Image (cartoon, helix red, strand yellow):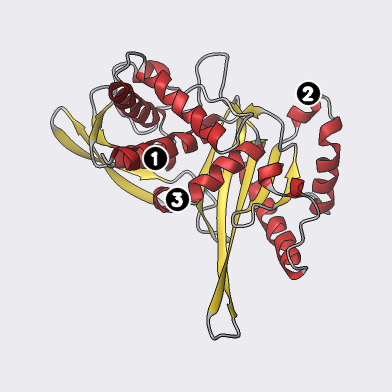
Amino acid sequence: MIGAPSPFSVALMLVLAAGCLAPDQAQAQAGVIVVDSFNRKVHLASAAKSRRPVGGLAKIATAMVVLDWAEASKVGVNVLATVPPQALSLARHNRLGLQPGDKVTLRDLIYATMMGGDDLAAITLGYFVGYDHLYRLGRQGDPLSEFVRQMNHLARREGAFATRFLSPHGSELSRSVSVSTAADMARLALYAVSRPAMHFYTNQRSRDITVFRAGQAMQVAVVNGNPLLGGAGVDGIKVAGDDRSGDCAAISAERPASVYKQADGSSLIYRHRMVVIVLGSSDARSEAQNLLAQGWNTYTGWLAAGRPIAAQSELLNFY
């Protein structure tokens, strides 16, 4: 884990060695990357291009597809969706106790998906949006398959070409699993944090949602599963893990903006935000904390040096 003595040196050695590792060796270590949001400069990376299961981090793509659809269709997120009959048979985790036939707004389903890590909520979002998409195209097909197609389309659009999603929740019951890389998940996370709507769904510690069951409204408490939220400027986005993906984290943190007075009396405001991705760790919480601290230290020195870019490969777009 990067967090031992001289962690920055360890990270640099791993970056240099990543291309020479055998597949089983590359898979044994966590895939990590630290990128600042506004410059897309890669400040730390280790095994960041190694494909591995992403588990519940797939839900980041699910939420973004739904939010993009809600905006493009002008339907919004206050419409009710019904938990489909097959949802229980497709989910590994039913953390909120949802049942087929329950009705929940898309807004509350996104809270349940992103904060609570609920698989049934993600499946319901996928089924609803996938069905609507097929209907608008005048096509027949499986709504969940259509939704997953949109998830993968989003990944390709953002340059995440090593990513393959298989479900809206990422906790597949089959032998095949959703896979990505730390670099690809950083691309998707940067897109997510650029959207104020996603920030709204991931920076709250808890939220009560409303579930309509048999005509009765029930209040269900959703607790944010991100243990790093609120510390060191962390305001999103998701921590997840299971026996197949290991411990995974996608963390976003912001520092106060710098204000520079200009000669004409105006002010130049320069914002600072960092994204940390950890895939396949034994302790994503500690690793993400260490990487965030290292990332800010590296970033501060980089700013002081005038933000030099020696090669385009230092930027995530070319990484």
Residue type, numbered disc 1: Asp
Residue type, numbered disc 3: Arg
Evaluate whether residue 108 shows in this view.
no
Compared to residue 229, the image places residue 21 above or below, namely: above
| Closer to viewer: mark 2 or mark 1 | 1
Disc 1 on helix, strand or loop? Answer: helix
Q: Which mark sits nearer the N-terminus, 3 or 2?
A: 2
Measuring from the top left, give residue 138's x and y in whole percent.
29, 19
Residue nearest the viewer, comparing 168 with 314: 314
Please report the residue visible at 57 percent of the width from the left and 49 percent of the height from the top.
251
Measuring from the top left, give residue 123's x and y in whole percent.
38, 26
- Residue that protrudes farthest toward the front in the picture: 264
Q: Which mark, by number, is residue 108?
A: none
Compared to residue 278, the image places residue 151 above or below, namely: above
Please report the residue visible at 42 percent of the width from the left and 38 percent of the height from the top.
63
Which residue in the protein does label 3 denote? 195
179 left or right of 42?
A: left
Which residue in the protein does label 2 denote? 24
Evaluate whether residue 63 shows in this view.
yes
Whether tag 2 and tag 1 are in contact, CB under 8 A, the answer is no
Q: Which mark sits nearer the N-terminus, 1 or 3?
A: 1
Q: Which mark, by number, is residue 68?
A: 1
